[in-house]
Amino acid sequence: MASTVLGFAAPGGAGLMITIGYMAVFFGIMWFLVIRPQKKREKEVAQMQQSIKIGDQVLLQDGIYGKVVDIINDLFIIELGLNKSVRIPVKKVAVAGVQAPNLTIGKKAEEEDPNVEYEYVEVEVEVDENGNEIVR
């Protein structure tokens, strides 16, 4: 009776074993496609956070850039902006990457390509005879 309730009529529980086999294959595929790569990324991020040293430019998870000026246990002391007196303690896990901010000047892209919002260009600065800057 149990085999008719479950929807298969295989003798001796062979249908149950096939179902368990399918589930095992499904979980194996999920392991290799989802769980294993996620653990690998977590390991790489933890290794990156452990390799940060004093003087590195870092990007925090909330989008703030700073410079590491001291390391105390599981905290980084981060110096923010151009004002050298602004220093905040930040947990190591809050660091998203080691990179410096991109401070190049961007201008609005032409309307030809709707997928590009800004394009980066170099700004040429000339000085006239009076010492005034002319930006082109």
Image (cartoon, grey):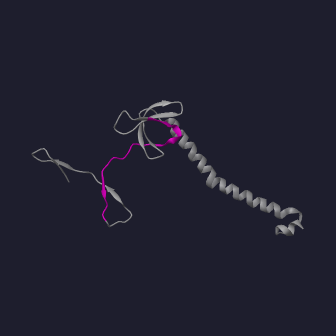
Residue 45 placement (x, y as % from top left):
53, 43
From the image, which quarter does the C terminus lie in? bottom left
Residue 9 seen by the camera: no
Looking at the image, residue 78 sits to the left or right of residue 23; the answer is left
From the image, which quarter does the N terminus lie in? bottom right
Determine the residue positioned at 78% across, 59% down.
20
Q: In this view, does 46 lie above or below 10?
A: above
Q: Nearer the viewer, residue 132 or 32?
A: 132
Q: What stretch is highlighted in magenta?
A: 88-110
Determine the residue positioned at 60% across, 47% down.
39
Looking at the image, residue 36 sits to the left or right of residue 11; the answer is left
Q: Nearer the viewer, residue 34 or 76?
A: 76
Residue 88 seen by the camera: yes
Determine the residue positioned at 51% across, 40% down.
48
Residue 116 placement (x, y as % from top left):
37, 61
Q: Residue 28 appears in which quarter of the rendering?
A: bottom right
- Asked if residue 107 is among those painted magenta in the image, a careful observer would answer yes
